[in-house]
Image (spheres, grey):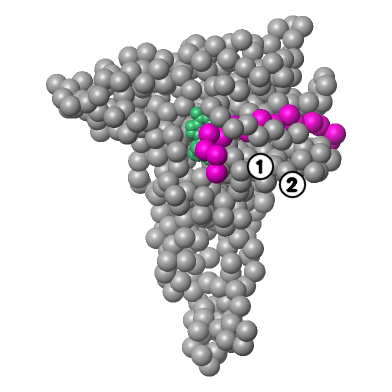
Amino acid sequence: MAEKFMATGTDKDYWASQALPSVLKHKLLGQYIPRFGGMTGSRGRHQVVYLDGYAGEGRYESGDRGSAEIAMQVAAHHLEKNALLWNCFFVEQKPDSVARLDLVAAHYRALGVDARVHHGDVDGVLSEVLQVAEGLPLFLFLDPCGLGLPFDRIVQTLNQRRSTPRRWQPTEFLMNFSMDAVRRLGGNARSARGLERSSERFDEACGGRWWREYFRPDEPAEADVDEIVAAQYAQRLREKTGMFVQSVPVARKPGQKAVYHLVFGTRSEHGLWFLGDAVARARDAWWEGLEIKEEQEDPDTLFSATSVVRPDPHAGGHRRCRARHGRQHGTDTAPAETALQTAQPHTGRVRCLLRTGHRTRRAQSRQAAAQQRPDGQHGRRRENPRTRRAAPSVKTVRRR
Ligand SMILES: C[S@@+](CC[C@H](N)C(=O)[O-])C[C@H]1O[C@@H](n2cnc3c(N)ncnc32)[C@H](O)[C@@H]1O
């Protein structure tokens, strides 16, 4: 059945807690969309329109915010601080997820946020969104699990929204382009037993049969063929819409293949610049998440593997770090730290990343504290990574 390749749902653990790729995705979204609102919403009617087309549940069982709640929080903040109104549309296909999403939305609606939850297919709601967004800025966040809207539908939407001298309606998008789907459907196309219907559905998603070139049954596929297809997809969007399009690979672990690309589009150079900044921060959150995960899995580790491979985003020279450490950070920025990131100014809020130095000091203080504590445990109690509060000590837990 073709459905095997069309994964549109989420697996049962998806909403338990954020997986690492989602940490990056959500940080990027949470960093970028307030800037979109700030850049575009201060003109005209002080309104923006936002569509989260594959909204999910809004919030994880762990309490972390999903894409929908991130947008609602931004909307609540802008409403209170800047009197800027976000008209938010959240579309979700699964009834259970819609019910949970609606509970989250009810909280924000009580704060005055225009949060409209729709049960159904994103394509069915798009026309209504475009109508509401006439003459207003529009941000589209499209985050399917597998294949999303047909390429032609996306291009037609973006082109119909071009601003004219009398109609200023900036439009931007952030889309999930599934690399898992590229690899699966590429394999399907190369296989003698592959399903033509699945390939046709991918034709729609890509805007033509061009991708099949890379998965000929009679030729061995190149190792990075998935990346070539993702780059081609972004290039075609660029050509068809005339927008700046930037594609950000997102992986589960360092050195692994991307699970998806986040494809961003804007007509504004400022937008592109802000995106670069948001990507740098999102990558930093991803590395942090990886370290926390590693430490949770092995609390007694002295040097996490992550700390060794983590590239130094300040390779270009960070004045505060130079002052603190008496030297400039190394120049080992990994190729994955794209040109976008290297172009980023960075603020003092990003913590200094002379990782091995920090590790050594932490390991030293643990060792010293362990010598002092009668129970032989490490001196500093472990922190809950989300609240940053120390977890209760063994003693406290026993007393309860
Ligand atoms: C990757 S999850 C969304 C995650 C969410 N955007 C977040 O970051 O918190 C994709 C969601 O899209 C929903 N979905 C799948 N096909 C859809 C469609 N055609 N229209 C609307 N929602 C759809 C799925 O049920 C699933 O909840």
Query: Is 400 in the magenta?
Result: no
- Where residue 278 appears, x then y in whole percent? 60, 39
Quadrant containing the C terminus is bottom right
Total of numbered circles in the picture? 2
Q: Residue at x 70, y 26 (%)?
A: 49
Amino acid under disc 1: Asp
Q: Is 101 on the left or on the right of 315, as rendered? A: right
N-terminal of the pair, mark 2 or mark 1, is 1
In the displayed structure, 368 sits above or below 284; it is below
Amino acid under disc 2: His
Q: Residue at x 57, y 77 (%)?
A: 381
User: Is there any visible trace of residue 160 in the rendered image?
Assistant: yes
User: Is there any visible trace of residue 35 in the rendered image?
Assistant: no
Which quarter of the picture shows residue 397? bottom right
Q: Nearer the viewer, residue 101 or 227?
A: 101
Which quarter of the picture shows residue 77? top right
- Where residue 258 appears, x then y in whole percent? 39, 39
Q: Is mark 1 within 8 Å of ligand 1?
A: no
Q: What number is the disc on residue 102?
A: 1
Q: Nearer the viewer, residue 100 or 167?
A: 100
Q: Residues within 10 Å of mark 2 (few under 14, many from 20)?
A: few
Q: Residue at x 36, y 21 (%)?
A: 201
Circle 2 residue: 107
The region drawn magenta spans 82-96
